[in-house]
Each structure stands twice: as C-alpha cells, then as structure tokens.
Amino acid sequence: MEVSRVRALRGPNLWSHHTSVEAIVTCSPQEQSIGELPGFESRLRVRFPQIGGLQPFGHYETIPLAHVLELVALHLQAEAGCPVTFSRTTATLETGTYQVVVEYSEEDVGRQALELAQQLIESARNDTPFDMLAALAQLRATDEDVRLGPSTGAIVQAAVARNIPFRRLTEGSMVMFGWGSRARRIQAAEIDATGAIAESIAQDKELTKKLLDAAGVPVPQGRGVSDPNDAWAAAMEIGLPVVIKPKDGNQGKGVTVNVTTREQLDAGFKAASEFRDDILVERYLPGHDYRLLVVGDKLVAAARREPPQVVGDGERSVRELVEQVNLDPRRGDGHGTSLTKIRFDDIAIGTLAQNGLTPDSVPAIGQRVVLRNNANLSTGGSATDVTDDVHPEVAARAVAAAHMIGLDICGVDLVCDSVLKPIEDQNGGIVEVNAAPGLRMHLAPSFGKPRPIGEAIVDTLFKDGDDGRIPIVAVTGTNGKTTTVRLIAHLLTAGGLRTGMTNTDGVYIEGRRIESGDCSGPRSARNVLLHPDVDAAVFETARGGLLREGLAYDKCQVAVVTNIGSGDHLGLNYITTLEDLAVLKRVIVQNVAVGGMAVLNAADPTVAAMAERTRGEVTLFAQDMGNPVMAMHRAQGRRVVFVEEGYLVAAQESFVERIDLKEVPITRGGVVGFQVENVMASVAAAWGVGTSWDAIRLGLKTFVGESDNAPGRFNVFDYKGATVIADYGHNPDAIAALVNAVESMPAKRRSVVISGAGDRRDQDITQQTEILGAAFDDVLLYQDQCQRGRADGEVIALLRAGLSNATRTEHVEEINGEFVAIDRALSRLGDGDLCLILIDQVDAALAHITARVKAAA
C-alpha cells in the first residue's frame, strides 16, 4: 500500500463541510480486498480493538486496505480525544487507486494519525509489534501542543455558537473573528480594543495602585524598593506582615506573602529578583484570595482561590501526597487543562520549611499542608466559584478598577474575608489588576458552577445580531468567471461598498491591484478577508484551489455558477467527466448561507440542477424567459433575470426592474451574447447582496469592458479602420461563444491568432481550431510561453490538426512567439477587417496591442 499526495482541506470541500486530510492510496491486487490477506483483520483487532466494524464502501462487497487506512486514521483521532466523525474512501478510475478522506480537528493531528494508521496496518500485515498506548499518547501530546487553550477555545466556541467565523492567526492564541472591515481580534483573554498603555499600566503594579487609590478603590499600602535593606526598611514603615513581589509580574511568579521576619524577606527579595529588577513591598492583607473577572462594564465571574495544598492521611509523605494529587486527570503541565499540576520546587520546599516540614514529612490524618503562599492556578492552586455571592459594592469596585486602568477584560485580585460585604467594611483591598487574565478558574472551577465567559467576551466584541460577516460572492464555472467577478465587484463598489476581489489576474482592493498572477485560489481569498478596508468580497473560485485546499470560508452570501463546459481541465486530478466537474463546482452552492442566494444559469441543465443542493434561495438567469425551468421558477414567486425586447429584466412576483441593454456598454447593445449572460449573472448577484437598483444601473453604465476594467475579456480596439478583439478564451466553449459574438460584427475579412494551453486534453486543443476553421479566413498559430508539460511543437501540431477539415480558412501560418504573431496579424489588416487575438500573457499582450494602436493613430 502506497500513500501519496497528502493534502489538508482547510475549508468546505468536494467531500464535506469538514476540514479533512485527503490522500491518494494505491493498493496492490492482493490489497484490494483484505480477504486476500489471511489473518490480517484479527491481528489488526488485537492491536486496535476500538476500530469497530469494517464496512464495505459503495457498491463493492470487498474491503480494500485503503478503506482500513481511512477507518484507523479516524478512530485513532477519536481515541485521542479529537471530535471527529467523518471519513470516506472512493475508488478512482485507476484500478487499485483510491482517494481517502479523513476529518481532522487539528491539521497536525490529522496528518500524524494518517502516518500512524499506515504504521499500524503494516504492523498487522507483518505481525510485528505496535505500541498503541505510545501512539495515542503521541497524538494527544500533539493535540495539546497545537489546539487552542481552554480560555481561547471557550471564546471561539462562543463565537461559533453565534455564527461568527473565526481564523487562527498564529500557532498561539491570536484569533480573528469576522471578516474584513467587521473583523475583531483577540489574543488569549485580551481584545484588540485594549490599548497598549492600559496593558503597560496593569504590568506596573506600583502605578496601578496609585491610580486605583486616586479612584477611591481600596489598595494595600506599599512602595518600590531597591535592595534587601531598603525592603526591610519599607516593611518597618508599613508594618509586618508584608508581601514582596516583582513590580511587573504575572501568574504569581516571584511572589512571597505573609512575610514576618528578615530572613523570610531576604529570601522573598531573592525570589522576586529572579523575575524582575524592580521589587515592590506592600502591606499583607489577611483573608481569602479572590479573582474577580470584569468584561466590559460588568462583573461576569468571581472565584475564591486556594493555594496548592495536600491533606495528610497519616501514611504517605508530603511528596507522595503531591504525586497522588497530580494524578487527577484535570491537572496538566501547562494551561491546556482545567487545573495545573502542583510544582514541587524550591519555593514549595521553602514553604514547607516555614511550617516545620520537609518533603519526606508524613502529615497527620486531616492535616492541611500548604505548598505555596500564593493561590495562582498556574502553580497548582484551585478555585471555587463565588459569583453569586458577590456584593454589589464589591462588583462596583472591581469594575471601577478595570475602567481606571483602561482594560476591557480584567482580572481583579482582591484579598478580604468575604465577598458578601463591601471591601471597606472588612479592611480588604485590591492587590493587583491583570490584563489578559486566565479564564480557567471560571470556565472549569474546582468547585461550583462554570461561568459563560466566552459568551460575555464575544458579546463585548460584537453587538447582538452582529455576526462579523461581510458579503462574500463566490463565482465559478467554465467560462465568464473573471468578467463576472469584475463586474460584480464594480456593481458593489457603485453601491458604496469597499470591495476586495480575487481572480486569475490578481488580488484587488477597492480597484487597486495589490498582487498579480493567478489568484483564484483560497490563499488569496483568505488574504482579502484579512484586509481591514474590505466591506464586501468577490472571489473567482477555480477548480484547482477547491481540490487542493477547499474553500477559504465556511459559507458565502451569494454563489454564482456561470456554466459547465468540457474545456475546464478535464482529465486532471480524477475529474474526468462533466458530472465530476459539476459536483466539484457546486461546492460553493452547497455552502451558501441560510438566507443567502445561489445564482444559476437556467440555460445549462447541469447548473440549473444545482438548485436542489443549496441551503439558500435561488435566482435563475437565462436570455430566454420561455425556458421551462425559468417559467416554473418565476411562477413559484422566485427571482429570475432574463432578456426581453432588448431589456435586461429582473423579476420576482410583482416586482419588475428593466434595464436597457443599450445602456450596458459591455454587451455592445445586447449583441455580444456571452457578455449578456455575464451581465445577467452579475446583476443577480448584486441583487442578492442587496445593492440598490440605482447603483446597479450606474455600475453597468460605467463598466465599459476595456482592458482596464476587464483585461483579456473581449477588449475591442480600432486599428487603422480594422476591428481588433483581444480575449483570453482558452477552451472550446469559450471559443464557440467568441465566434458567435464576432459573427454579429461586420467584417470584410476575418483573421484569428491562437495558441493552446498544454494542460488541456488533446481533443480540447484540437476542437478549438475546428470551431475557428469554420469562421475565419486566416489563422495564425503560435506557441505560448509555457507548454505546461507538452513537448516543443506538440500543441501547434494539435491546433493544425483541428484545421485539417476547415470549411472557411484559406490561410494558415505558424509564428514563433506571441508578440511576433500579434505584429504579423496587425500588419495584414486592412480597412473593415476583423482580427480576434487569443492572448496568453494577458497584461503584456494587451500593453503590446495598446502601444501598436496608439502608434498607428
């Protein structure tokens, strides 16, 4: 069994809505049925009994080894604690070759599970050892390393529950919610609205106390110190006991509390100095340690924190008791679990010594042994939820403290006897204010009720009813995609939306190209959704990106399918038929949001049938309203766009909007049929987004279709009285549409310049010139810059073969080089002639033609 071409499908894809790993798996004849592998299944079950039943797939009764790989990879993840449920194996047309798809929750874990599954299968085949416990431990460790921690994860889960999209920006805890101009960002429990100055203030504990004191918030007396002698002097000024800690610290690092002797103070100063040079001494407040969590202008949770401790049983030593407590599955080494393991370090040993104990001491039954004087969860402490007990005055003081510092999410550390009464009544005080506070103690307290912290933070980021989404229009099909994308973007811009766009020419933000090249894949789309100046996005969605990685978003507001034709790379990546291609292209239709719109070409039965696959509404377009599918759709009160007596008509029930095609330059008065179809699709999409009809009319009128608006899409030039048309058509359907368009334009003599893309099938290349040979007098063939795997001259030979039975072509010429061919064609033109130039290097070729036209003017 050979596993090759492993891909991560990071968004909705050909197979499902789930993120998945896809692999090509080749099985030998014997491996195409595990029944041909004696003893294999029983050996597999000995090693991995949790795999369950091995079910045949599709209509096959046999079970290939590829299917076993799929199930093992899925169940390994499930046993490691990953929430995965989807997998499938599909046979390709190549005997013994399968496409295996397995869902993942974390990409690294999914890839690792596939590798381990392959190792397990080899172990079962060869009857060699396989350490299942080690494999699962490896997967769990990887999962804990890469997945979001519980605090950030809770915020993400709350956002998902509100239908807010998210994207992880780093391997750490920085996450973006929403898209474009409506996006917000967090890092752990800190939001993008929090200023750097507020964070700096929170880190400076002395300045924090000064500001809180000015706001009337009770704080312990104290000051900064320079050395142990100064620290002791400060302690004498304040009065023992005291607390010594770093001026700028977090997670209780370097903090020593309840200092009553010079020896303790010197040790505390040394401990604090290991973390910061600036040291603070302040009055020790007796009482319980509370953490109050403020989000926005509300106290949303409160917990009483207890220092790490064990309780004696009269038999085991302190060290053994700690080891026993650390076996609790809720305790981990980092922040990925609800509790952290108790650290048995020098600080713990020192704390024991203060109480006359050592690690080997055996506490009496019921004796409480504290291993640290601070109660941070990160050092092994525990928390009890007390949110419902907090006195309104205490809550008000916590909110005032957060606002004084300027923190949107704030952890307020309070020391007092009880939160049931005001702080001032019990000589308590706020000892710290924390930016980016830990949320674990509130999400999963050791005791008491968990609190919906994620929901509170998301509600602060997004108002009720705001899902952070901008309109996304996805466009796919065989022909017309790029022009349709450009025109939709133009219409949305006319409607006042700052629009981002991706297509085969580049990435555009508000009409300015920021990246060139073929940008019709998910990477470019994701970049647009990151841009803060984008109010709407229009994405050309090519088959390659869909197959490689899936969609860049979970759902779109509008999906447009222009048509399905035979020239769109059939024969590549197991997409061999129009039916295969339609299944791939309809992915965008299947991922239209509820309440969104699928815009479908009713004149193409394959496209029209996609209406059954969407969760949104459907707008159908076709030039002929007599089309039965269109007529039925309109009779049902649904949206249609068609052409009637020279007008583009948009209708739904009693609503009718009519636009004179003479006011739409790109259609040349309605003569260029394929441009009329592109306009219908674009108008339907803009209607689906909610663009006003005044804006749509203005946009159609100002989109002239020249090389600046739609380069390589039926760009028309006047050259010495002849008509020159430049277009990027490169498949039989596109060529047929172009021929239909130019035949409506008068000409004395017609010529065409053409090359062919090497990554098409032979018959697709030959068919192009078969079509042209019946419509043009002169044909100039050239070899384009990139042959895409073809031998030198191979494409030219296929093109010439297509002209062997030409009914009109009188003259065929082969030219070496695109620009040489263009110059040759222009030199042969006379007044009233027409020349169609099928360009390859779009920008450079258009610039060359433009320069020649200007020179001839």
Image: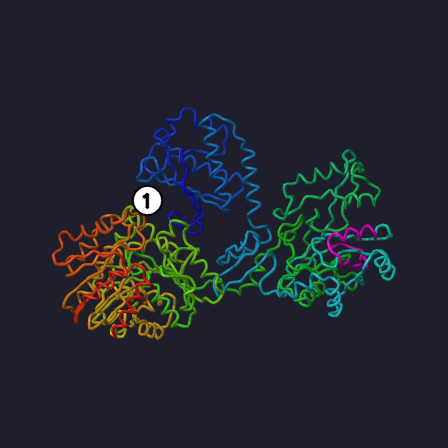
Does residue 646 appear left or right of residue 214 in this picture? left
Quadrant the C terminus occupies:
bottom left
Does residue 31 appear left or right of residue 660 in this picture? right
Q: Position of residue 378 (x, y in %)?
A: 68, 49
Depicted 713 relative to depicted 19: above or below: below
Does residue 282 appear left or right of residue 663 in this picture? right
Q: Residue furthest top?
A: 38
Q: Is residue 362 visible?
A: yes
* Neighbour tally class for label 1: few under 14, some 14-19, many 20 plus, Cα within 10 Å: few
Quadrant the N terminus occupies:
top left
Task: Residue under label 1, please give it.
Answer: 574
Instruction: Name which residue lies at 74% across and 54% down.
Output: 289
Does residue 523 appear left or right of residue 583 in this picture? right
Q: Please check the rendered image and state whether residue 823 is part of the magenta-colored stretch, yes or no.
A: no
Q: Which residues are magenta?
A: 265-289
Q: How is the image coloured?
A: rainbow
Q: Please check the rendered image and state whether residue 288 is part of the magenta-colored stretch, yes or no.
A: yes
Instruction: Name which residue lies at 53% across and 64% down.
Output: 462
Q: Is residue 632 visible?
A: no
Please tell me which residue lies in front, 742 or 181: 742
User: Based on the displayed image, in which of its 4 quarters is residue 846 positioned?
Assistant: bottom left
Instruction: Name which residue lies at 45% across and 48% down.
Output: 19
Please tell me which residue lies in front, 365 or 401: 401
Depicted 180 relative to depicted 802: above or below: below
Q: Position of residue 609 (x, y in %)?
A: 28, 54
**Number of callouts in the render?**
1
Q: Position of residue 752 (x, y in %)?
A: 20, 61
Q: Position of residue 180 (x, y in %)?
A: 47, 64
Q: Mark 1 falls on what kind of element?
A: loop
Three-letter residue code for mark 1:
Tyr
User: Based on the displayed image, in which of its 4 quarters is residue 239 positioned?
Assistant: bottom right
